[in-house]
Image (tube, helix red, strand yellow):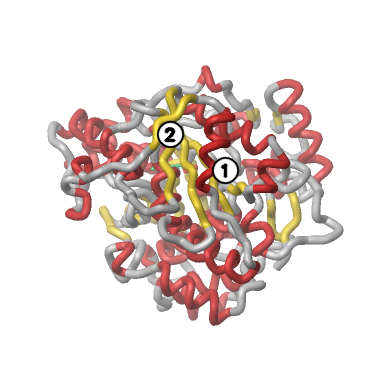
């Protein structure tokens, strides 16, 4: 399997998986996509129905990561998807709420959000590829919570990797802060920046714009456009499908709380591989860039100032960074059309596919979308608690709200649980009148010793810190 860019780079020389794993954007600003989607034959799908999570992961990943020897890949997957890390042998267990409605638990990893599924594997893949190539990488990122902690937990103690994670000083919840700052591994550097999340992002952008610095210190990222993350997430759509159905003749709908379009893109890829998924129910909160697109055909990223601060903060996005991969398919995988659309985006602030020949392809892709408000999420949390005795977090509530609004009684709808309620105590308290239970490992988390360095939102000062602490080959 080789990879090309959505904007045409690499078309003459498609890249192997390990090359795109460590890259962020392609040199032309596009995203890595596989040259084709491999398809599972019906007999292969039938054989996978009884497979363990690791065997499912191997069946999926070996098709996308074929420049890693199969035995090595199997070893990395076995080391990643353990009962110790994810709390059960099923890794992503499924709860049937009632006939035709289920919850897929993909958030039982170390930081209680679905991002652990992909990042824990990335930690192992990075260590393997860096050792093989005698390289190091210095991951520099900005976080307002979830992604940063999942990345740090996945990369702590890894050979050849250092992490510099910028977070807005004093602006995260005590729980989020403790999840990151209580890590004491020498290769994890928590940089508490005196400023907002946007200030943190600006510093990271400035560092990445300095090509000489970037090359000298092998600066990398583990952001949501990383293709390895998309592949890792495909696996739980297989496991969720098999757990929710009795035979491969059945179809299901998945409801996915969405922000950067990464999680739901993995569902879309799973279907492209032949998994019998019918519809993809895309849920947004008040930041409804994607809901607007699927209803109207207009894609209009918001300005940072237009982004709402909501009770499902990990979905508070202004633009959907993985969306370009979907558009690439919609326009017949023609990089010239993608380039023209993204030029239009830069010039006019958006594009509209409704009146174009591409709209039929969007509609044929089987997405339906639904937006929720804070009140909708509170109602969904209460409904699920009252009807089924299950407490869901506000992101999952976006998805359940969408599922209940758009569900088809003839088909099972599987809602993807993207975080555990313990992370969002204040909203649960507002909805249910009591705080959610905390997994044992998190009791007393905020009281543990913390390790972080406070720095001004100053590019030179952050660079100086990186120079002093970087992992070098
Ligand atoms: C990241 C995140 C999302 C959004 O996922 P995308 O892949 O960006 O669409 C939803 N819920 C939670 C809890 C998250 O952490």
> At 60% from the left edge and 43% from the top edge, which residue is drawn?
322
Q: Which residue is mark 2?
A: 167
Nearest to viewer (mark 1 / mark 2) = 1
Q: SS at mark 1?
A: helix
Q: Is residue 405 above or below residue 123?
A: above
Residue lying furthest top: 305
Say whether disc 1 or disc 2 marks the residue closer to the N-terminus. Answer: 2
Q: Which residue is mark 1?
A: 467
- Nearest to the observer: residue 285 or residue 140: 140
Q: Callout 2 environment at 10 Å: few (<14), some (14 to 19), or many (20+)?
A: many
Left or right relative to 127: residue 427: left
Ligand 1 resides in the quarter of the picture at top left
Provide residue 383's location: percent of width, then percent of height.
Answer: 23, 39
Residue lying furthest right: 12
Provide residue 394's location: percent of width, then percent of height.
Answer: 32, 37
> At 45% from the left edge and 37% from the top edge, which residue is drawn?
143
- Nearest to the observer: residue 266 or residue 454: 454
The residues bearing labels 1 and 2 have C-alpha atoms spaced at a distance of 19 Å
> At 30% from the left edge and 32% from the top edge, which residue is drawn?
173
Q: Does the image show residue 128?
A: yes
**Label for residue 190?**
none
Q: Is residue 272 above or below residue 399?
A: below
> At 47% from the left edge and 57% from the top edge, which residue is drawn?
118
């Amino acid at each position: 399997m080789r990879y090309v860019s959505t904007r045409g780079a690499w078309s003459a020389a498609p890249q192997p998986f390990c090359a795109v794993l460590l890259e962020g954007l392609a040199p032309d600003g596009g995203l890595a996509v596989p040259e084709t989607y491999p398809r599972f034959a019906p007999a292969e799908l039938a054989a996978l129905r009884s497979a363990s999570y690791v065997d499912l992961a191997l069946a999926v990943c070996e098709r996308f990561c074929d420049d890693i020897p199969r035995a090595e890949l199997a070893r990395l997957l076995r080391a990643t998807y353990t009962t110790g890390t994810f709390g059960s042998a099923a890794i992503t267990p499924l709860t049937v709420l009632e006939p035709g409605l289920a919850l897929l638990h993909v958030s039982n990893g170390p930081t209680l959000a679905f991002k652990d599924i992909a990042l824990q594997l990335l930690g192992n893949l990075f260590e393997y590829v860096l050792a093989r190539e005698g390289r190091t990488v210095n991951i520099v990122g900005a976080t307002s919570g979830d992604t940063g902690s999942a990345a740090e937990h996945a990369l702590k103690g890894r050979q050849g990797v250092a992490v510099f994670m910028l977070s807005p000083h004093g602006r995260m919840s005590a729980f989020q802060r403790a999840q990151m700052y209580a890590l004491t591994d020498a290769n994890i550097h928590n940089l508490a920046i005196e400023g907002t999340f946007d200030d943190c992002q600006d510093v990271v952008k400035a560092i990445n714009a300095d090509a000489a610095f970037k090359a000298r210190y092998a600066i990398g990222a583990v952001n949501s456009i990383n293709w390895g993350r998309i592949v890792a997430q495909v696996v739980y759509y297989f496991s969720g499908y098999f757990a929710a159905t009795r035979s491969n003749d059945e179809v299901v709908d998945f409801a996915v709380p969405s922000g950067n379009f990464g999680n739901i893109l993995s569902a879309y890829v799973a279907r492209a591989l032949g998994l019998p998924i019918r519809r993809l129910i895309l849920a947004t909160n008040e930041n409804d860039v994607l809901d607007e697109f699927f209803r109207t055909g207009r894609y209009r990223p918001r300005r940072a100032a237009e982004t709402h601060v909501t009770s499902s903060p990990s979905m508070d996005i202004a633009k959907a960074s993985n969306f370009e991969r979907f558009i690439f398919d919609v326009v017949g995988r023609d990089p010239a059309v993608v380039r023209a659309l993204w030029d239009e985006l830069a010039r006019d602030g958006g594009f509209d596919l409704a009146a174009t020949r591409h709209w039929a392809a969007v509609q044929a892709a089987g997405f339906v979308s639904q937006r929720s408000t804070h009140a909708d999420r509170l109602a969904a949390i209460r409904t699920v608690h009252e009807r089924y005795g299950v407490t869901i977090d506000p992101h999952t509530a976006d998805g359940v709200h969408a599922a209940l609004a758009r569900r088809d009684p003839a088909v099972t709808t599987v809602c993807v649980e993207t975080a555990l309620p313990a992370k969002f105590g204040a909203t649960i308290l507002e909805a249910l009148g009591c705080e959610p239970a905390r997994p044992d490992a998190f009791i007393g988390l905020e009281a543990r010793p913390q390790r972080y360095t406070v720095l001004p939102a100053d590019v030179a000062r952050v660079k100086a810190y990186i120079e002093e602490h970087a992992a070098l080959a």
